[in-house]
Amino acid sequence: MILSCKNCGARIKYDPRSNRLQCEYCDSSFDISEYQVKVGYHEEGPVLESEVYGGQDDMECQIYRCSACGAEISVNSVEASTFCVYCGSPNVVFSRIAKVKRPKKILPFMITKQQAEMLIRKRLNSGFFIPNEIKNFHAELIRGIYVPYYITNVAYRDSMVVKSRIKSGKSSYSIYSLRSGYCIFDRMTTDASRKLSDDTSVKLEPYNMVSLRDFNEGYLTGFYSDISDVEPIEACNTATARSKELFNAAVLDTVKGSSKEIINQNPEFVVNTEPMKAMLPAWFLTFRYKDRPYTILVNGQTGKVVGGVPWNKELFIGVVLVLGIIITLIAMALLGALLLNSGGHSSSSNQSTGRLIAAIVVGSFCALGAGITKLKTVLKSIRLTSESSLTGYVSKRQNGG
């Protein structure tokens, strides 16, 4: 299904800047409500790829015909909108959506492709160790995709005993704290695509659910989109697990001491067994560096950029070595001055120099520790960014969007 301009008949796409359907030819714009799909609408259904080209009967790809040029479009089992590889027309595979329970809500794109590109370039250009090959990515690699989500409400209650350590002078002792509380997690989002890991989708959050709108196929035109391949019960389990994690973290923040540990708890929860289906927007940039794919994501509503990229290790090591040498030389110079002054100068001057040397050493170790912690975080982000399932989520899309 292709939405056509009522004035000139050319194709139209959803424009995030105006929140309207925009004609690329005559520049006319229309409200989404003007293109409601009629009840009883029917279009030619899909044909298995094996029936068209022969081969195995269990191939997952299906063949649709482009509504504009009649060319064959190959889609996977969850795609709901795509682009024709021949004429570039945006196609909404409406018959696919009609065969499953339709999403109830959709959060339209509010960040344009140009804005997403600018945000990604700003993020990459701020990285001193990021190679220029990555910074100079091609904008046509950016894809706008509606990701399927479940929206779940969870009422969570718990009581627990928390063990922690309290310092008292040079010694420490254990204390036990009793905590209980009740919390309602309203409109908790969990992604409904098996191709996206929960760790990746969580980093895209938060989305502002106040902007949710009733689902309309018009929002899909000009973008890629998928339907859910996760069962509602699985989404409920994920939502309750996240509720427990968030609740525990909030409780531990109220407990004094260190080495905090929950040694006993009794969670109770009530979750809506039929979570609401929705489509939420995200921009995906997938590129290759040294024959390995990486993906950067941008929240299509807020512009939040997610993802780690490789860095120039040689440059990083060189900078660390140079800084290490400089710090060592400064410390040696100060130490030499301290030794020379110890012969007859005031002890207060020697003490000041000694404190300065100690401060430099301590500061260096603190900076090293913070750098190692930051490096671990970056490496984790890079692992998520280079997951084969994530890069495949984008790379298998039709060209032209």
Image (spheres, rainbow, N blue to C red):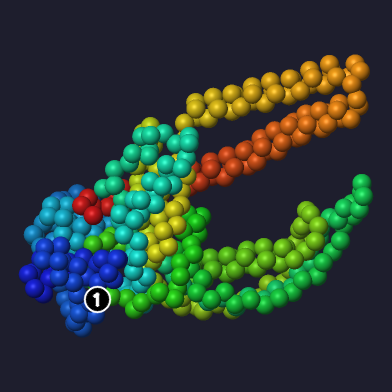
Which percent across, then down, holds residue 161?
79, 67
Quarter of the picture containing the N terminus is bottom left
Q: Residue furthest front?
A: 345
Please give left or right for residue 342 compared with residue 120 in the image: right
Which percent across, then down, holds residue 307?
46, 48
Query: What residue sits right under mark 1 in the picture?
Result: 32
Please give left or right for residue 42 compared with residue 228 in the image: left
Total count of labels = 1
Crowding at mark 1 (Cα within 10 Å: few <14, some 14-19, many 20+): some
Question: 129 and 345: which one is in front?
Answer: 345
Quarter of the picture containing the C terminus is bottom left
Q: Is residue 186 visible?
A: yes
Q: Is residue 226 visible?
A: no
Q: Residue at x 60, y 68 (%)?
A: 243
Which percent across, then down, holds residue 315?
50, 27
Question: 49 and 172: which one is in front?
Answer: 172
What secondary structure is found at the residue carrying circle 1?
A: helix
Question: 356 and 32: which one is in front?
Answer: 356
Q: Residue at x 51, y 71 (%)?
A: 188
Please give left or right for residue 207 compared with residue 241 in the image: left
Quarter of the image where one finds residue 93: bottom left
Quarter of the image where one finds residue 240: bottom right
Quarter of the image where one finds residue 95: bottom left
**Residue 384 against residue 102 in the figure, above or below:** above
Which percent across, then down, holds residue 65?
13, 61
Q: Residue at x 75, y 62 (%)?
A: 262
